[in-house]
Image (spheres, rainbow, N blue to C red):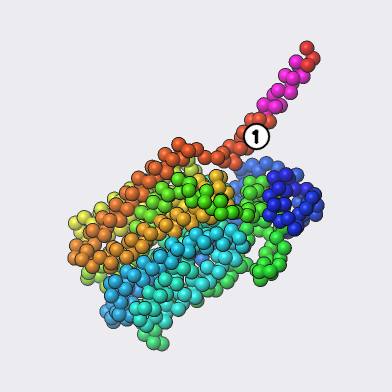
Amino acid sequence: MELSDDVREKSVSLHPTHIRGEPENIAFAGHEDMDLDEIPRPDPASLSKIYRKLDLRIIPALWCLYFLTSAIRSNVGLALTMNASEHDTLTEYLGLTSHDTSLGLALYYVGYVVFDVPFNLVMTRIAPHAWISRVVTTIGIVGACMAAMKAAWSFILLRLLLGIMTAGLWPGMAYYLTLWYPPHRCAQRIGFYFTAAQISAAVVGLVSAGFQYMNMDRGLTGFAWMFLIYGLVTIIVGISLLWWLPDRPSLGLEPRVGWRRLIPKQRPVLSQEDFKLHFADMKATYVAHAWTLNDLVKVLIDVRLYPLVLMYFGVVGTGIGLQNFATVIISSINSSWSSVDLSLLTAPIWICDLIGILIVTPLSDRFHNHRAIFFSGPSLIIMAGLIVTTYAPTDWSRYAGLLITGFGLGPTVPICMTWTAEIFQPRHGEVGTAVATAVVSGLGNLGSVTTTYALYSGWPADAKDGYRNSNMVMLGMVGNSILFAVVCSLLRRALGDPMTREQQWAQQHNAEQKDQDEVPQRAEDMYF
C-alpha cells in the first residue's frame, strides 16, 4: 500500500527510523489492508454518522470525568456551610479565618495557571488519553486526602496541590476533542460534557444534604465523608479511562516500546469504511506533528489570543465566584435559611446553567460564523441576573436573579474554548490548539483568582451590604468580556483566516468542474 505524498512527507520527517524510501507495508492500526488511494471525499451525511459513533465512545467518558473532577473542585464551597448548627463547618472545624479561606481557594487557581500550558504541551508528546487518565486519577487522590484535613495549613496545601493536579484538564479535553472532530463541530460537544459541571454542582448540592446526616459517623465530619467518597470514585474512573477513552487518531506507525507498552492496547474505534472517511476529514490529526519553540512563539504572539483570554477572564471568574460562594450569597439574601436549605437552593442555579448550554451551544455550532453574538447574548443575561440579585426588593426575586445568572453563564465558557480552537487550529495546527486553549484557560482563570481571593469572603466589609459590591465587580468583569468578544471578531475580519476544509473542497470542485468544461472547448479549437 502507498501513502499519499503529503502524509508520506509528514511521516518520513517524524518517523525516519520506520519509513525510508517507498513506505511499503505501512498499515493502519487495526486496518492493515486499507489503501489510502481509495479514500473517497466524505459526504456530510456519512460524516455525521461517523461522528455520532465517536460521540457514543468519547463524550460519555469526558462527561463522567468532568462530573467528578468538578465535584471535587467545587464541593469545598458547600463544605463552608455544611453542619453549621453542629459547628462542624469546614471553617469552624479547621479554624479557618476569612483570609485562610480566600487564600486556599485562590491558590488552587495559581497552581492551575502556572502549570496549564506545560501540562497541555505534554499531551501533544504522549498518548492524550493516558495523560487525561493521569490527571483524573491524581485529582481523585488529592480529593480523597482532603478528608484527613485537621488544620488550616493542610487546607491551603491540598488546595494548591489540587490546582496543580487539575492543570491542563479543561484545555486538554478541548485539545483532545479537536483530534477527533473539526472545530466547527466542537462547541456543541464541549457544551455536552460541560453540562457535567452544572449537573455536578446541582447533584453535589443535593447530595451534600445527605452527607450532613453522616456527620461524625465513624469520627468523620459530613464534609470529610463527601471529600472521601468523591475522591475514591474519581480514582476508579481515572484508571478506567485507559480503556474507555480512545487514543489519538493514528496511522499505527508508533511502535509499542518504552512507556507505550504500559498502556493497554485498544480495539479500533471505527470500522474500516468509517475509518477511511474520518481519515479524509481529519487527515492532519492522524500523524503527530513535532513542534518546535518557534511554533510555540508564533502562537503566543498571535494578537487573536489575548482578546480570548480577557473574554474568558470575565465569564469564568464570575462562574467560579458563583460556584464557590453560592451558599454564601444565598445566605446573605435570607440568613434564616438553614444549611440544608442552602445546599438545596444551589441546585436550581446549575440546572438553569445546563438549560442555557443545551439551548445555545447547538445554535452556536449551526451559525459558527457568529460566535461573538452567541457569546455576548448570554453575557448580557448574566449581567441582568447580577443586577436583579443585587437590587431586587424581595428575597425570592433576588434568588431568581441567581437563576438568570446561571442560565447566562452556561454557554459562555464552551463557546469561548471552541472559538479558540476554531481560530488557532487552521492557522497553527495541533500545537496552536494545545497552546491557545491552555493560555486562554490558564491566564483566563486569573479571573477565578480575583473572585475567590478578593470578593465575598475575601472582602469581609462587603458582607453587611449583602455582597453588593462583589456582585457589581463581577458584572464589570462580564461587561469586559463582551467588549473583547467584539475586539476578537473585528481582528478576525481584519486579519483573515485560512480556508476551512469545506472551502478547500469547494475550491477544488470548482477547479475540476472548470477543467471538465474546458476540455470540449480545447477539442473544438483543435478541430477548427
Residue at x 40%, y 65% (from the top left corner): 110
Q: Give the image location of residue 235, x and y in percent.
A: 53, 74
Q: Give the image location of residue 392, x and y in percent.
A: 21, 55
Residue at x 48%, y 61% (from the top left corner): 116
In the image, 221 versus 5, the foreground residue is 5
Q: Give the image location of residue 310, x and y in percent.
A: 39, 51
The span shown in magenta is: 513-525
Q: Is residue 71 above or below residue 421?
A: below
Q: Residue furthest bottom?
A: 218
> Within the image, what quadrant is residue 520 found in?
top right
Q: Is residue 321 above or below residue 501?
A: below
Residue at x 65%, y 48% (from the top left corner): 283
- Location of mark 1 (residue): 508
Q: Amino acid at mark 1?
A: Gln
In the image, 100 versus 42, the foreground residue is 100
Residue at x 72%, y 19% (from the top left corner): 521
Say whether residue 225 is visible. Answer: no
Q: Main secondary structure of the magenta part?
A: helix
In magenta segment, residue 524: yes
In the image, 348 versus 16, the foreground residue is 16
